[in-house]
Amino acid sequence: MSVVDNYKKIKVDVDKCSMKAGHKVELLAVSKNQSVLKMDELANSNVSLFGESKVQEALPKINYLSNKYNNLEFHFIGKIQTNKLKKIVEFFHLIHSVDREDVLSLIDKYALDLNKKQHILIQLNIACEKQKNGIAVSELENILNTASHYKNIVVKGLMFMPPYEEDVTKNIKYFETANKLFCQYKSDVFDTLSMGMSHDFKEAIEHGSTLVRVGTYIFGERV
Ligand SMILES: *Cc1c(COP(=O)(O)O)cnc(C)c1O
């Protein structure tokens, strides 16, 4: 099957789950480690949301595709390095992975320079995994409070990535916590819960996700 066929199949599943859950869900095609040609095929079939996790890898792809299509949005889902932040703010519509207070002032500054409002999500580390990005639940209120003081930052919601589990049902409790926190702050602006990947997007949507990040099931194994 082509990437476009894969995408369409996942999209049907996402839409079904979305109907059942009773809320809108967007599908982000996670194109990290995938060729720009496959992205081009998708963009040519009207897919407009792409997720990337490395700045150096993403920039040439974004350049190429943005010259060809004017409806694309790129989301940054990787670990944030401060020396790459300027480029991230310049080229990405939404940053999913904000998990430290000290990057907020930089994001605000770069966004101001570009005269843009940078949309961000705060990444949660609910299961307290040492190796994973994300803030502890106890720090959420603080970082949201700090972010609210920056004029060029708009916090659109939360991002969560659970521990890897073969058996997805083991992570339901974390999805529930993420959704509860999301609902606590939800508003017309704070409207995005980024949660769910190839193997668990159905469960994530059932538990409140409004944006799923799917790589492998669309593109195949990363090369
Ligand atoms: C790679 C990645 C994904 C996509 O994972 P798949 O299992 O390939 O769907 C989603 N979110 C983040 C943050 C990622 O790094």
Image (spheres, helix red, strand yellow):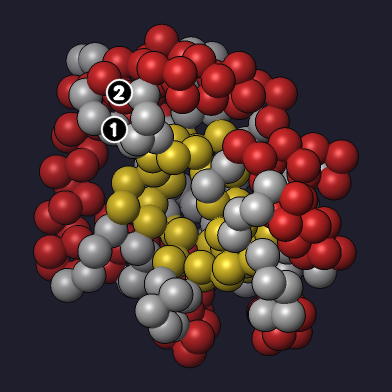
- Residue 42 is labelled as 2
Q: Is residue 130 visible?
A: no
Q: Is residue 218 positioned above or below 1 on the image? A: below
> Going 65% across and 53% down the picture, which residue do you hit?
115
Residue 105 appears at what percent x and percent y? 82, 64
Q: Which image quarter: residue 22?
A: bottom left
Q: Find numbered disc 2 in the image and state the secondary structure of the residue it sits on.
A: helix
Closest to the observer, 64 or 161:
64
First-in-chain label (1 vs 2): 2
The numbered dot on residue 47 is 1
Classify residue 137 by image quadrant.
Answer: bottom right
Within 8 Å of ligand 1, the CB of disc 1? no
What x and y, as percent, mark residue 108? 75, 61
Residue 56: x and y in percent read: 71, 23
Q: Are marks 1 and 2 in contact (CB under 8 Å)?
A: yes
Q: Disc 1 versus disc 2: distance between alpha carbons?
A: 5 Å
User: 10 Å neighbourhood of mark 2: few (<14), some, or many (≥20)?
Assistant: many
Between 77 and 89, the residue placed more toward the observer is: 89
- Which residue does the image show at 72% across and 73% down from the upper left? 150
From this viewpoint, which residue is outermost toward the bottom? 184
104 w.r.t. 187: above or below: above
* Residue 17 pos. (x, y %): 18, 59
Quarter occupied by the C terminus: top right
